[in-house]
Amino acid sequence: MGMPSGEVFEALDAGAIDIELGGCCISDDDPTHRCAACGVSFGGRPAAQERT
């Protein structure tokens, strides 16, 4: 967690790494995975009532 370093942004721009950066807000249904082939985000934690 936290702000990625400038080196991470440079590596992304150069195509040296393939990662998905998240946003600044975290909720219970944020995606946890991204398909490398099509870019679709999916997954996430179950809803609060389903976690019991």
Image (tube, grey):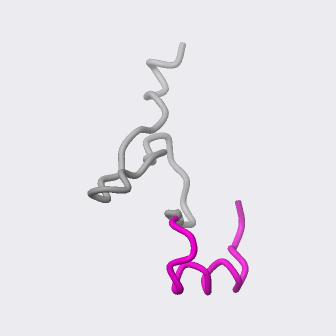
Measured as percent of width and height from the top left, residue 12 is found at 54, 78
Q: Quadrant of the N terminus?
A: bottom right
Q: Nearer the viewer, residue 22 or 36?
A: 36
Q: Residue at x 49, y 33 (%)?
A: 45
Residue 2 located left or right of residue 30: right
| Relative height, residue 8 to residue 39 (above, below) | below
Residue 4 counted in the magenta span: yes
Measured as percent of width and height from the top left, residue 20 is found at 49, 63
| Relative height, residue 24 to residue 34 (above, below) | below
Q: Residue at x 43, y 42 (%)?
A: 29
Residue 11 counted in the magenta span: yes
**Numbered circles on residues, count:** 0
Quadrant in which residue 10 is drawn: bottom right
Measured as percent of width and height from the top left, residue 43 is found at 41, 38
Residue 37 located left or right of residue 24: left
Q: Find the magenta span and give its range.
A: 1-18
Toward the front, the furthest residue is: 16
Q: Residue at x 56, y 70 (%)?
A: 17
| Relative height, residue 21 to residue 27 (above, below) | below
Q: Nearer the viewer, residue 23 or 6?
A: 6
Q: Nearer the viewer, residue 7 or 44?
A: 7
| Relative height, residue 38 to residue 4 (above, below) | above
Measured as percent of width and height from the top left, residue 23 is found at 52, 66
Toward the top, the furthest residue is: 52
Residue 4 located left or right of residue 38: right
Q: Residue at x 44, y 18 (%)?
A: 50
Q: Quadrant of the C terminus?
A: top right
